[in-house]
Image (tube, rainbow, N blue to C red):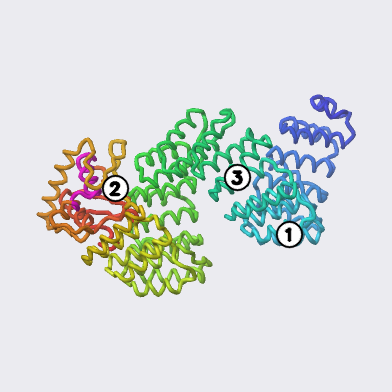
């Protein structure tokens, strides 16, 4: 019988005596995924008493595995009177291909117990299982066994070993495997580029690509996609554009994976014109990844409205959003504290059954926290069945942003008790929470135990948090000593924290040193000049204030204007200092004046030290009265229903006088007011603030 006569096979089963032909037919059914015909053939073999030897059974196991009928494959394997290395390999490969990775490893171990020697295909399949499970130590043992069996330098096995080490974060061992290979192919080179990229060494990924080009290895679309991803992560616009020219020259611009990688690269380097040009080229070749990459780009440049328009468009085109689409959009809402849009996206998440996705849930925890709804953030977290490190970190970060240091510490204990290991991000949030809550000793203890107890090496951001922790509490001398003993110079955030602490605690000399350091690191940053000016103004050194402002003018350094915004009526309303451009300015002005009278009756006394100007007290009081956050609150009180919370966002630190005034406002209007400034949340209610006046 010829192989092409497959459709007539079942009619002539009794006349067929050549097992090779039967095996060939089974193999073709496997390749073409014709499970129904394959089952019919198998039943004919059984009912006619055709001898199912080891050779044919191996082909049937392979066929059922490829057709995703693993139960049939397992039953056949278990009933085999005689097995050979092909039988074991077919079963191991079947488990691995069907994501039954633990069973693949167990079967490999049983194969060794049965004293069968694995071949390169068995090694490759079980190594892939180790990759998926993250079993790098077992993978090392397999590596040793592969060398012992003579397959360690076989290209197929070597590629999988390099892939395993790189994806498990052991890039040094991946490089060693790569360098020891007698020959390499594009699969192995791609595994190396991917490995560097996935481990955050994007420069290494680009260097491997350059070596690949220099050695004349064939560049395919997988290589280009991985290298473009590295360019995007590095914000390497020039390198990305050079790769784009390579893509065009090699004719891969219509390959959807490359097109998506290009869209993603341009989005990450904030070149949305370039991203749109790639995206719009050949509209037939788009998928959900294409749209998600574009959305990512808009979120990156804080154009959440454009991101939401793209989201509506992808659904109109018949594409279903995935977890990455939602995560990006919700992240954008979190960054801009766009609560209404975030709530609508949460509803969509539930509609598309992603509410149980651990990654999406973690972003929702963060979003509600950044929008000021602490209770909702906790509720979303509590609904997660098995919180990952992302979810735990999100919750700790939320507590930190809201100044709830004790709750952050308690969450860390719960996290460890549940068997989730804290990482570098965990401790940044934890130290921030301790700093905002005045938990000095607790914060220092965790900082000094990070590496010893948890294996987390302190980085720049951790040291900056400790500077903030000590400075905020007034321990400026101790903070200064800490800075001197650091293994590296503080970054801009560290010096800014120290300078801010010097302003709060009126330490002029240390403040000047911190300002000079900050100006060297970020000469265009007006924050250093403004904070130092405030220190001088507090000491009434008006000549120094004048000289500093002249220095700013000469250097063309512009002070960042303060502004606040409120969501009301499906619209964001933005207010600046003494900003009367709003259509309802008359109502706002009347409300603001009425509030001032009421809070003064309740005991409010203006803190004019907040105004770094040499003017009379009456002028200072008027300027304070027209700060952006107070205008925003006045507008919210006349626009937002009583049952909804008032949430005001501010781009700068709330001043001491506004902090005092808002406490009184919350008391006289009997409303809860939430203010998010550039470092934390303040929850005002009944004349008190959640920060306890420590912020």
Q: Quadrant of the N terminus?
A: top right
Distance Cα–Cα, label 1 vs label 2: 60 Å
Q: Horizontal and vertical percent for residue 112? A: 77, 58
Q: Residue at 41% of width from left, 51% of height from top?
A: 382
Distance Cα–Cα, label 3 vs label 2: 38 Å
**Is residue 566 positioned above or below 320 on the image?**
below
Asked whether residue 414 is in view, the answer is yes
Q: Quadrant of the C terminus?
A: bottom left
Q: Residues within 10 Å of mark 2 (few under 14, many from 20)?
A: many
Extent of the magenta region: 623-642
* Secondary structure category for the residue under label 1: helix
Tell me which corner region of the image, top left, top right, bottom left or bottom right, holds residue 520: bottom left
**Of 424 and 363, the residue lying toward us:** 424
**Of 533 and 329, the residue lying toward us:** 533
**Of 305 and 218, the residue lying toward us:** 218
Q: Residue at 31% of width from left, 48% of height from top?
A: 649
Q: How many marks?
A: 3
Asked if the magenta segment contains residue 55, the reply would be no
User: 251 left or right of 362?
Assistant: right
Farthest residue to the front: give it.
Answer: 554
Q: Horizontal and vertical percent for residue 195? A: 64, 53
The residue under label 3 is: 228
* Secondary structure category for the residue under label 2: strand
Q: Verify CB contact (< 8 Å) between mark 3 and mark 1.
A: no
Q: Horizontal and vertical percent for residue 101? A: 66, 50
Q: Say which label, 3 or 1, has the lower sequence index.
A: 1
Tell me which corner region of the image, top left, top right, bottom left or bottom right, holds residue 438: bottom left
The residue under label 2 is: 563
Q: Main secondary structure of the magenta part?
A: helix
Q: Verify CB contact (< 8 Å) between mark 1 and mark 2.
A: no
The residue under label 1 is: 143
């Amino acid at each position: 019988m010829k192989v092409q006569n497959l459709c007539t096979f079942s009619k002539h089963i009794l006349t067929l005596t050549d097992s090779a032909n039967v095996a060939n037919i089974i193999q073709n059914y496997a390749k073409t995924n014709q499970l129904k015909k394959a089952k019919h053939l198998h039943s004919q073999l059984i009912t006619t008493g055709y001898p199912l030897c080891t050779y044919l059974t191996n082909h049937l196991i392979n066929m059922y595995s490829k057709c995703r009928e693993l139960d049939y494959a397992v039953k056949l394997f278990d009933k085999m009177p005689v097995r050979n290395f092909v039988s074991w390999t077919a079963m191991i490969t079947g488990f691995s291909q069907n994501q039954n990775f633990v069973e693949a490893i167990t079967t490999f171990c049983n194969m060794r117990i049965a004293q069968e020697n694995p071949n390169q295909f068995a090694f490759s399949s079980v190594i892939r299982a180790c990759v998926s499970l993250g079993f790098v130590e077992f993978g090392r043992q397999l590596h040793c066994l592969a060398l012992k069996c003579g397959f360690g330098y076989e290209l197929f096995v070597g590629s999988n070993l390099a892939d395993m080490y790189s994806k498990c974060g052991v890039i040094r061992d991946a490089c060693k495997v790569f360098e020891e290979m007698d020959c390499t192919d594009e699969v192995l080179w791609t595994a190396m580029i991917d490995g560097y990229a996935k481990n955050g060494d994007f420069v290494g990924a680009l260097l491997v690509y350059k070596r690949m080009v220099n050695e004349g290895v064939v560049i395919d679309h997988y290589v280009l996609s991985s290298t473009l991803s590295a360019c995007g992560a590095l914000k390497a616009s020039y390198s990305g554009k050079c790769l784009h020219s390579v893509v065009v020259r090699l004719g891969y611009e219509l390959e959807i994976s490359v097109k998506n990688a290009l869209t993603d690269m341009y989005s990450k380097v904030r070149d949305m014109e370039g991203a749109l040009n790639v995206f719009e080229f050949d509209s037939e070749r788009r998928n959900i990844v294409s749209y998600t990459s574009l959305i990512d780009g808009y979120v990156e440049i804080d154009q959440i409205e454009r991101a939401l328009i793209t989201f509506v468009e992808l659904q109109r085109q018949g594409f279903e959003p995935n977890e990455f689409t939602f995560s990006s959009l919700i992240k954008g809402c979190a960054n801009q504290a766009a609560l209404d849009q975030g709530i609508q996206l949460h509803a969509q998440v539930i509609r598309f059954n992603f509410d149980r996705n651990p990654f999406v849930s973690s972003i929702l925890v963060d979003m509600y926290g950044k929008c000021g709804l602490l209770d909702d953030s906790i509720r979303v977290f509590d609904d997660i069945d098995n919180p990952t490190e992302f979810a735990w970190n999100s919750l700790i970060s939320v507590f930190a942003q809201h100044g709830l240091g004790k709750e952050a510490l308690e969450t860390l204990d719960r996290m460890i008790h549940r068997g989730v290991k804290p990482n570098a991000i965990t401790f940044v949030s934890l130290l921030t929470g301790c700093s905002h809550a005045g938990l000095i000793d607790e914060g220092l203890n965790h900082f000094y135990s990070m590496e010893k107890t948890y294996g987390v090496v302190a980085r720049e951001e951790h040291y900056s948090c400790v500077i903030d922790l000590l400075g905020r509490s007034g321990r400026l001398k101790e903070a200064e000593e800490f800075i001197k003993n650091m293994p590296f110079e503080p970054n801009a955030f560290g010096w800014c924290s120290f300078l801010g602490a010097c302003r709060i605690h009126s330490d002029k000399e240390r403040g000047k040193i911190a300002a000079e350091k900050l100006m060297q690191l970020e000469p265009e940053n007006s924050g250093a000049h403004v904070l130092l000016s405030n220190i001088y103004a507090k000491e009434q050194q008006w000549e120094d204030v004048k000289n500093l402002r002249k220095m700013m003018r000469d250097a063309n350094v512009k002070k960042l204007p303060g502004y606040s915004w409120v969501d009301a009526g499906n619209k964001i309303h933005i207010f600046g200092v003494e900003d009367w451009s709003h259509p309802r300015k008359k109502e706002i002005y009347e409300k603001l004046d009425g509030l001032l009278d009421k809070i003064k009756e309740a005991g409010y006394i203006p803190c004019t030290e907040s105004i770094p100007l040499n003017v009379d007290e009456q002028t200072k009081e008027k300027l304070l009265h027209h700060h952006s956050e107070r205008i925003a609150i006045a507008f919210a009180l006349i626009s937002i229903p009583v049952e909804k919370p008032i949430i005001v966002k501010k781009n700068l630190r709330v001043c001491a006088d506004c902090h005092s005034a808002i406490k009184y406002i919350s008391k006289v209007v009997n409303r809860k007011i939430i203010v998010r400034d550039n470092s934390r949340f303040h929850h005002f209610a009944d004349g008190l603030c959640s920060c306890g006046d420590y912020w």
